[in-house]
Image (cartoon, rainbow, N blue to C red):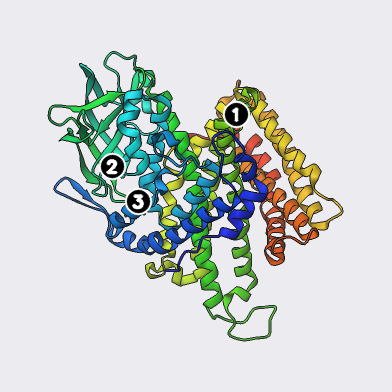
Amino acid sequence: MTPYSAPLEDMRFVLNHVVGLNEITKLPGFEGIDTNLTDQILEEAGKFSSNILAPLNQLGDTKGAQIENGIVRAAEGFGNAYNQWAQAGWNSSPFDAVHGGQGLPWTLTTALWEMWDSANMAFSLCPLLTQAAIDALERHASNTQKETYLEKLVSGEWTGTMNLTEPQSGTDLGTIRTSSIKEGDHYRIRGQKIYITWGDHDMTENIIHLVLARSPDGPPGSRGLSLFIVPKFLINADGSLGQRNDVRPVSIEHKIGIHASPTCVMSYGENDGAIGYLIGEENRGIEYMFVMMNNARLAVGLQGLAIAERAYQQAVSFAKERVQGKPIQGSLDNSTIIEHPDVRRMLLGMKSQIEAMRGLCYEVAADLDRANKIEDKDEREKAQAMLELMIPVVKAWCTDTGLAITSTNIQVHGGMGFMEETGAGQHYRDARITTIYEGTNGVQAMDLLGRKVVRNGGETVHTFIKNVQETIDQLDTKNPIQLSISIHLKNSLDALNSAVAWMIATFPKQPGQAAAGATSFLEMMGLISGGWMLARSVIEADMQLKNKQGDKKFLNSKIATAQYFAQAFLSRAPSLLYPIRDCGDCVIEFEASNF
């Protein structure tokens, strides 16, 4: 399999010159973080990803995790890699120093996570769920619970999980049956959960499960759910580990991909009942769990970018080495396939979409930092609103695009791509889950439409439109490339304005017709977001070229890549207005018996 090399030059460009990491580090709590420090952190993360995590990726796919006598054994080499990861402090990077964290901005941490995901997505899923659990506990746990669990979760000494899904309850969490019975200062939890990522393993001495279960006397449906801490091993008063709790892995799911990430069926309370501790108040479990889910949705969108980057690097390497035929525009026989126009088209399509996704993921992470750290209440609320608007776009558009890019990688390889030896198939198989978990992309589209656009009359999406328009106004229309980008971005924005107006008018009276266009609406938002980020890159790259700053070859590549994205992908956004507005009647009225 092709080695992984972190794209540090592009990462630094986006962080420092497009999304404004230097401005983020001026926010309260980020004192002492400067460009020299962030460069060193990125450099070391790149080394760890390339040297430690990436070599385990294909081995983990072929060998996978195993379950033996009710204990899950991590794939070969993963335990050692995890110990190095935790000891190096990578797990603690974004968390509060009060609990042993390093307090780095999420903007920077997102770039680190891109590297972990690219190098070995199955591995990175373990600390990803820990990260989500920490976030939920920081926001909603009692002080005693924080003192008991956070320090060891932040350090990586323990890991965390998120337990929602049950055999009869997928997206519809209101049908959850796992029960809780109050018993003194704790509860007894009974039920079964499925699809629990890293639900059990032998890499750490304890695992802290966050479990969604029905309150003892709660109302029916999702309103009667509470969130509980259920540790694998109970914790004694002195902080040492006590007896094994009544929770165990029943089996590991047999999956298409991410074989080294044990996706477990978990049983709670087969004997006396698993001991669980209520987080916050009863009947507010959905509210608390959404903290974890929103955190995870941004992280999953980033996985789409990351696995696309890994597939792209493999495709480029193969295209530069594979000798095949004579290019139509050339005169040399036996050229490498990178000389063929269609192969170049595929590679440039991959590259341009990756750079668009990277800009978007880092921008949304910057919104997360602004929402957490800005002192002015109004500005903080604006950042939070933009974050919530863009989370479903990042999750769905980046994973749909990432999956398509892993498929293109197979196509670049030709017949060799269909052979498992090349490793191209693993990226495609691993990427396939990203469009499904943490809420399918159809669910993300409905979340964007119903909760983020229609609910407030389009206020936040119109702020987004205004932000994009400001970038259009900054483009130099005397420059042919910037003019081209400006035209495509303006046409797309006009279409989005029309789509928003139609959705706001239609959804209250004909929700089914509006819902039928939700996925196309989200795709339009994704394309415009990516085009917006690349337009900002072009403005910065041109300025650096005029001032004779930066690497000329890299900057010219950025401009050409953005131009291609605008012409090949952003240009498609206006056409999405037709399926958004015109297909709903056909979808709703089509007889089910005709399928």
> Seen from this angle, which residue lies furthest right?
478
Q: Residue at x 74, y 46 (%)?
A: 489
In the rendered image, residue 156, in percent from the top left (x then y), is placed at 34, 44
Q: Answer few, some or many: residues within 10 Å of disc 1's Cα (few below 14, many 20 plus, some between 14 and 19).
A: some
Point out which mark residue 87 bears: 3
Point out which mark residue 199 bears: 2
Looking at the rendered structure, the secondary structure element under dot 3 is helix
Q: Answer few, some or many: residues within 10 Å of disc 2's Cα (few below 14, many 20 plus, some between 14 and 19).
A: many
Looking at the rendered structure, the secondary structure element under dot 2 is loop
Horizontal arrangement in the rendering, residue 486 relative to residue 59 (left or right)? right
Looking at the rendered structure, the secondary structure element under dot 1 is helix
Q: CA distance from mark 2 to mark 1?
A: 33 Å
Q: Nearer the viewer, residue 585 or 476?
A: 476
> Seen from this angle, which residue lies furthest front?
32
Check the image and report above or below for 40 versus 248: below
Point out which mark residue 385 bears: 1
Image quarter for residue 273?
Answer: top left
> Is there a contact, CB below 8 Å, between mark 2 and mark 3?
no
Q: CA distance from mark 2 to mark 3?
A: 22 Å
Disc with the residue nearer the chain's start (2 vs 1): 2
Check the image and report above or below for 43 versus 157: below
Tell me how many marks there are: 3
Q: Nearer the viewer, residue 489 or 27?
A: 27
In the rendered image, residue 222, in percent from the top left (x then y), is placed at 38, 22
Disc with the residue nearer the chain's start (2 vs 3): 3
Let me know if residue 518 appears in the view: no
In the rendered image, residue 254, in percent from the top left (x then y), is placed at 28, 51
Q: Residue at x 41, y 66 (%)?
A: 423
